[in-house]
Amino acid sequence: MPSENEALRSKLLDSSVLHTEKFWFSKQMLLRLLILGFVVCVVLMFTEFRRRIASALSPAADWMHR
């Protein structure tokens, strides 16, 4: 039945859209990729420098604990 085919081919789950340049180079997708890249960089920096961050914050933590 045509209505079943239309229901199964939802626009939300259409993977053929992923293969178009319009999808990847739209302003919305570029903004999402930029934000994702920024978040990944922040997480990597935090992971790399977590000991230095903890050492830098320990005097304030000791002061607050007293």
Image (tube, grey):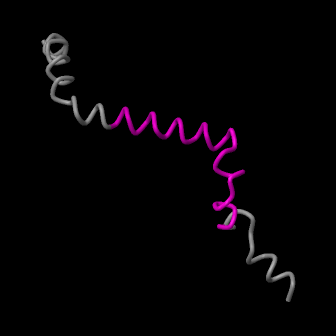
Position of residue 48 measured from the top left corner of the image (x, y, whole percent): 22, 34
Res 11 quadrant in image: bottom right
Q: Is residue 29 above or below residue 12?
A: above
Is residue 28 on the magenta stretch? yes
Q: Residue 24's x, y, as percent?
A: 64, 50
Q: Quadrant of the N terminus?
A: bottom right
> Taking 66 as reference, is 17 above or below it?
below
Report if residue 27 lies within the magenta region. yes
- Would you place residue 51 above or below residue 16 in this image? above
Residue displayed at 68% across by 52% down: 23
Pick the front one: 46 or 23: 23
Q: Main secondary structure of the magenta part?
A: helix
Q: Which residues are magenta?
A: 15-43
Instruction: Give the x, y percent position of residue 43.
Output: 34, 36
The residue located at (28%, 32%) in the rendering is 46
**Image height of 42 relative to 8, above or below:** above
| Extreme residue toward the front, this view | 21
> As drawn, which residue projects farthest toward the right?
2
Q: Is the C terminus in the top left, top right, bottom left or bottom right quadrant?
A: top left
Q: Nearer the viewer, residue 19 or 15?
A: 19
Residue at position x 68%, y 67% in the image: 16
- Looking at this rendering, what residue extends furthest in the bottom direction? 1
Q: Position of residue 61 (x, y in %)?
A: 18, 17
- At a point 14% along the width and 20% down the height, the residue shown is 55
Q: Is residue 12 left or right of residue 61?
A: right
Q: How many marks?
A: 0
